[in-house]
């Protein structure tokens, strides 16, 4: 049972902490360790001066939170959005710690963000924000310290600017300082598709568990950006029936299955999902409650809440986004018998291939796409099995099992290292 006061249901750090507390109690974790692991290691707030195109100087507020470096360098994206908050970045940084531990890769957790609206900024303004943000964080970033990646509102180009700024300061090219870079600058094959591919792999595992076949499995995906569109493309190609898709503009539903390649072609030309005419228009939030077998929220946080979780019809909920379900909604979904693939497992394919990118950059030896995908599959399959087995043994939900597994791994490493005083 997860306890969150109603007025704090939508606070993201609260969402993390509520699950953390339940998992730590189930593990019987020492009180001191709970205190250490529940709090971030470092929070940095920046006031970034930027010369705008029209000549005036503006200040943008940016954050970098390093939650844990116990198992390795901090790892986590940089988010550019108008509603970024420190609370959100703090939550996302902690989730990165647990996510990296669930898939057992040697990273801690970190996250960054800048309060800005990338849609309203020129390329030059975005570049200047990114370079100054990076320069201010020079002492904290690095392949052995903290390795950013793209998130909402940032992309390969942003990572190229971070890498170049860092490299200029240290006087040599350091490709391993960021992941999610363009291929020609040390990016990894398969990174672009990795999060969506990881989601498909864990859905395949859930289907195997319920002895279902892909063609009889109807999928709804909310979010058609990097993660949602890749999941839709790969799952459509693999034989799943994608019956509903939404983006920020709205959604469409077609019970016989949507023509995903056609929709991808449309959106690649700057159009939105609502412009697709083959299907019935649906509200971007209402799509979550239509009839389907697999529901994949792949957009933003706090979509499935205590107010609407009862309306979810899906049998399997695969959380491609970070924090799409609030903590009080967890109990409702559990009572309904929804099989949950929690975010820190479901969307870990992205950070897993980021790890491969970091390894390849440090070795200066690059893998072919088949090898990347094969190693990704191996890790996602093992991690899914670990979480589901843990849930069965400890009689907890898959979400609490994923937290328990992760916290146990980080706490074990922390105990081995000891607290430096
Ligand atoms: P993105 O910016 O590429 O795409 C976001 C999509 O969501 C867009 O299609 C947008 O139109 C849609 N959207 C925004 N608000 C919406 C709303 N209220 N209702 C419906 N649709 C809405 O972002 P992304 O990289 O695909 O990330 C999506 C989620 O996945 C985020 O929670 C992110 O943190 C998480 N995630 C991303 C990665 C990655 O590799 N990109 C890895 C792990 C987790």
Image: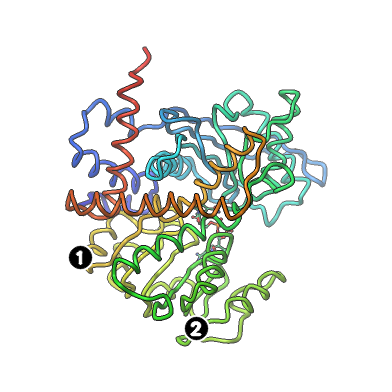
Task: Select label 2 or label 1 by which is in front.
Answer: 2
The residue lying toward the viewer, choosing from 269 and 177, is 177
Residue 160 point in image, percent of width and height:
71, 42
Which residue is rendered at x = 41% and y = 38% of the image?
A: 97
Residue 136 point in image, percent of width and height:
65, 28
Which residue is rendered at x = 46% and y = 79% of the image?
A: 241
Q: Mark 2 points at which residue?
A: 257
Residue 335: mark in rendering: 1
Left or right relative to 35: residue 281: right
Report if the beta carbon of the residue with label 1 is closer than 8 angstroms to ligand 1: no
Q: In this view, does 390 lie above or below 132?
A: below
Residue 324 point in image, percent of width and height:
41, 58
Left or right relative to 242: residue 278: right
The residue lying toward the viewer, choosing from 157 and 308, is 157
Which residue is rendered at x = 18% and y = 48% of the image?
A: 394
Q: Quadrant of the C terminus?
A: top left
Distance from Cα at disc 2 to Cα at disc 1: 29 Å
Mark 1: give few (<14), some (14-19) or many (20+) Cα within 10 Å: few
Left or right relative to 382: residue 24: left
The residue lying toward the viewer, choosing from 117 and 162, is 162
Q: For the residue labelled by badge 1, is the local secondary structure a helix, a strand or a loop?
A: helix
Which residue is rendered at x = 56% and y = 64% of the image?
A: 230
- For the residues bearing labels 2 and 1, Cβ distance under 8 angstroms: no
């Amino acid at each position: 049972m997860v306890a969150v006061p109603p007025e704090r249901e939508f606070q993201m750090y609260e969402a993390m902490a509520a699950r953390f507390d339940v998992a730590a109690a189930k593990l019987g974790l020492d009180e001191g360790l709970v205190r250490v692991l529940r709090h971030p290691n470092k929070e940095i707030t920046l006031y970034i001066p930027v010369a705008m195109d029209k000549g005036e100087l503006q200040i943008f507020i940016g954050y970098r939170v390093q939650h844990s470096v116990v198992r390795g360098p901090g790892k986590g994206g940089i988010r550019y959005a108008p509603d970024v908050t420190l609370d959100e970045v703090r939550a996302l940084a902690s989730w990165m710690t647990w996510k990296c531990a669930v898939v057992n890769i040697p990273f801690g957790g970190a996250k960054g963000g800048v309060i800005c609206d990338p849609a309203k900024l020129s390329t030059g303004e975005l570049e200047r924000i990114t370079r100054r943000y990076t320069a201010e964080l020079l002492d904290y970033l690095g392949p052995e310290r903290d390795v950013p990646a793209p998130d909402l509102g940032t992309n390969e180009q942003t990572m190229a600017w971070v890498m170049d700024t860092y490299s200029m300061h240290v006087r040599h090219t350091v490709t391993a300082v960021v992941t999610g870079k363009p291929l020609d600058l040390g990016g990894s094959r398969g990174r672009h598709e990795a999060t969506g591919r990881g989601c498909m792999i864990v859905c395949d595992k859930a289907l195997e568990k319920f002895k279902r076949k892909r063609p009889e499995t109807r999928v709804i995906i909310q979010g058609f950006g990097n993660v949602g569109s890749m999941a839709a493309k790969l799952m459509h190609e693999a034989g799943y029936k994608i019956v509903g898709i939404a983006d920020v503009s709205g959604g469409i539903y077609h019970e016989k299955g949507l023509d995903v390649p056609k929709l991808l072609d449309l959106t690649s030309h700057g159009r939105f999902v609502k412009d697709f005419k083959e299907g019935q228009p649906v509200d971007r939030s209402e799509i979550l409650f239509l009839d389907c077998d697999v529901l994949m929220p792949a957009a933003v946080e706090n979509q499935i809440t205590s107010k609407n979780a009862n309306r979810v019809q899906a049998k399997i909920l695969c959380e491609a986004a970070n924090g799409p379900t609030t903590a009080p909604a967890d109990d409702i979904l559990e009572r309904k018998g929804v099989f949950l693939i929690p975010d820190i497992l479901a969307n870990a394919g992205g950070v897993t291939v980021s790890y491969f990118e970091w390894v390849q950059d440090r070795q200066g030896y690059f893998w072919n796409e088949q090898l990347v995908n094969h190693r990704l599959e191996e890790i996602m399959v093992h991690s899914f099995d670990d979480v589901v087995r843990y849930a069965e043994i400890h009689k907890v939900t898959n979400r609490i099992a994923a937290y328990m597994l992760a916290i146990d791994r980080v706490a074990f490493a922390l105990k081995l290292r000891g607290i430096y005083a």
